[in-house]
Amino acid sequence: MHLISRAREDALRLDRGLIPALRRLIDPERDKPVLAIDIMSVKVPRAIATTPLGALLPLMGDTDVEAVPILENGKLIGIVIRTDLIAAMARGLARESV
């Protein structure tokens, strides 16, 4: 679960808008702060540095996954987000049209 999903759930449960629910979640004055573990997901696709970008497209296009962590020897070395893929595709198309 990520922050937006959690805020959406809180907004529906508390019958308030998304922005007020999000503000409530990140409010530093909360009695019990929301921790990263409360909203993070560890069940996400992962890749390595040599994974072709084309292999990441279905991971992000067919799911709610917004980002794919890039690992090397089990350690995080980067992250690819949807806009990275869109930019890479746009650059590729621009090169092809020249």
Image: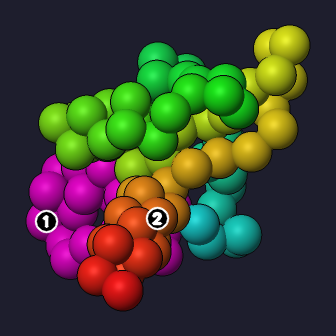
Q: Residue at x 18, y 51 (%)?
A: 13
Q: Quadrant of the C terminus?
A: bottom left
Marks 1 and 2: in contact by CB < 8 Å? no
Spot occupied by residue 82 in the image (x, y as percentages of width and height): 40, 58
x, y percentage for residue 79? 65, 47
Task: Verify whether residue 16 appears in magenta.
Answer: yes
Residue lying farthest to the top in this orientation:
73
Q: Tell me the residue that label 2 is attached to.
A: 88
The residue type indicated by label 1 comes to Asp
Q: What span is in magenta?
A: 1-25
Label 2 neighbour load within 10 Å: few <14, some 14-19, many 20+: few
Number of numbered markers: 2
Residue 19, placed above or below residue 85: below
- Sequence-first tag of 2 and 1: 1
Please give the name of the residue rendered at 70% of the width and 32% of the height, measured from the top-left corner: 49
Depth order, front residue of 1/54: 54
Task: Specify the amino acid type for callout 2.
Answer: Ala
Please say which color scheme the image uses. Answer: rainbow
Secondary structure state at the residue bearing disc 1: loop
**Looking at this view, is 87 or 16 the one in front?**
87
The picture places residue 22, in percent across and down from the top left corner, at 42, 69
How far across and down, in percent of the image, does residue 94 sit?
37, 81
Given the current orientation, which residue lies at the most extreme front position?
A: 98
Mark 2 to mark 1 CA distance (whole Å): 40 Å
> What residue sits right under mark 1 in the picture?
15
Name the side, left or right, on which 68 lies relative to 94: right
**Could you tell me if residue 18 is visible in this image?**
yes
**Residue at (42, 58) in percent of width and height:** 85
| Residue drawn at the location 42% of the way across and 76% of the way down | 95
Q: Is residue 42 magenta?
A: no
